Structure formats: structure tokens, C-alpha cells
Image (cartoon, rainbow, N blue to C red):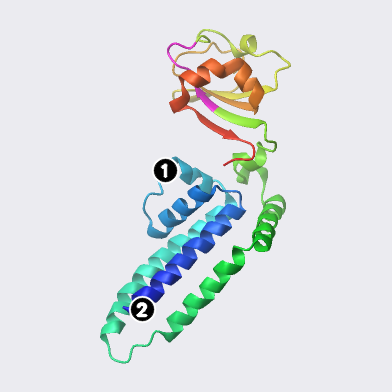
Amino acid sequence: MGFIIIYMVIVFAVVEIAAVLMRATGLNKDISRFQVVSLLTSTGFTTMESELISDHPIRRRIGMFLILFGLFSFAVIVSAIANILAPGFQSSYLAAAAGALIAILVLVRTPMATAFLSSKFNRSLERKFEVHELPIKDVLLLEESDYFVELPVGPDCSYIGQRMRDILPSDADLNLLFIKRGTINVRKKKYETALEAGDVLYLYGDKKEFDAFFAEEMEDQAPAIMTRGGGRT
């Protein structure tokens, strides 16, 4: 029983340390803990939020460790049960490992350590990774007002049959990246293409511009819209 308690402490410490590291990369607190547990147990990692892990180079590395640790943990538990049944089993080394992890957890939770990790991870992204390797948030969403939206064109949308060049003024701080139409991504003539029901518009720009030109559409299609804003993940 003592072994089980000690090992649970180790698992708890690993989860909390990994969650702190995830948060240091800019990930939301609740999302980070859920994804850490998902990775560790190899369950529930098919959520839309998993893209926040797989699209980020540093989070991917943390995720790889958690997956491997989860597999190792299963093997250790099976082996430990066998050892517990054997005479002379000692858990002193395991208790020492648990104590070390708790000490690390206390350390990384301090404000100074959190600030250091955030700064370190940001510098790592700036120095070691190409733009195409970084997630949308770190490439496009640099200001609080920056916004990225996947906007479906509903059957009752007032813009059906219109072209984006007629919808958006040339001086609008809003950019159409491409139009997804079924399995086709319209890029070359994206501003000249008449919109159809079922299209999905991939837009990037200022939050106020979205509210000015697409407020009604965003309200009508709210459940189907994916948005990412600067300063939030």
C-alpha cells in the first residue's frame, strides 16, 4: 500500500510540473491540466484543444515525455505489484524520487520560476523554430486586437452570391486568407469568387473590423465558428 501511495504522489507531481510548463508556453490553466492528463493516460486527446499541443513545438516535446512516462508507469506498476508480493521489498528509493519531484513542483510554481520559464520558452521559439513550425497564435496573433476566425457561410447569410472584394473595403484591417469550399481551398481568386452556402471563410485581422462587417454572421453561426484572439489560447 505504501508503494501505491508514493507512486501516486510521483504521478501527481509529474502532472502538476507538466501543467506548469504548459502554462509557461501560454496555454490556458484548465486546458493545460486536462491535456496533460490526457497525454499521460493516452485517453481523451482527440479534442479540438489537442491542436494547441500538436501545433506547438515546445508543447509537443512535453507531450512526448508524458506519453512515454505514462507507458513506463504502467510497466512500473505491474512490476511493483510483483515486487510487493516478494519478501524484502523496500520503497525508500521511490520515496526519495517522490520527494525530489515535490521539491521541483514547489520550485517551478514560484512566481520567479514561472516568469523565467515563460521568458525561456519564448526565446526558444524566436531562435530555434521557423515561422511555419509555430502555431497561429505565435505567428499572427501578436496584439490583443488581432483575431483569426473560421467563419462558415450559412444558408441564410446575406453575403451569399457576393464577392469579398465588394464586401470588404480596400482599407479594411481584415484579410481573407482563403475560402474552403468542400475539399477545395480557393486562394488565387478568393476575392473574386462569389460566396456560396457551405463555404468557410478564413479571416485574419482586427477584432473591431470583424464586429463591423461580420457581427450578424458570427452571431448566427456562433456554434460553428472557431476564433483565436491575441493574448488568449
Q: Position of residue 133 (x, y in %)?
A: 61, 46
- Secondary structure under tag 2 reads helix
**Which is nearer the eye, 183 or 167?**
167
Is 154 colored magenta in this rendering? yes
User: Is 83 situated above or below 174?
Assistant: below
**Can the viewer see residue 199 in this picture?**
no
Q: Residues within 10 Å of mark 1 (few under 14, many from 20)?
A: few
The answer to whether 227 appears left or right of 165 in the picture is: left
Residue at the farthest bottom position: 88
Quickly name the residue at label 1: 47
**Can the viewer see residue 98 in this picture?**
yes
- Secondary structure under tag 1 reads loop
Q: Quadrant of residue 94?
A: bottom left
Indicate which disc, 1 or 2, sits on the residue closer to the N terminus: 2
Residue at image position (50%, 20%) is 219
In the rendered structure, which segment of residues is drawn in magenta? 150-157
The answer to whether 14 appears left or right of 140 in the picture is: left
C-alpha separation, residue under disc 1 versus residue under disc 2: 33 Å
* Quadrant in the picture for the N terminus: bottom left
Quickly name the residue at label 2: 3
Residue at the farthest left position: 85
**Which is nearer the eye, 13 or 185?**
13
Eye-nearest disc, 1 or 2: 2
What residue type is disc 2 on?
A: Phe
**Which is nearer the eye, 139 or 19?**
19
Secondary structure that dominates the magenta span: loop
Is 215 colored magenta in this rendering? no
Residue at image position (33%, 73%) is 77
Q: Residues within 10 Å of mark 2 (few under 14, many from 20)?
A: some
Q: Position of residue 76 (x, y in %)?
A: 36, 74
What residue type is disc 1 on?
A: Thr
Q: Position of residue 145 (x, y in %)?
A: 67, 31
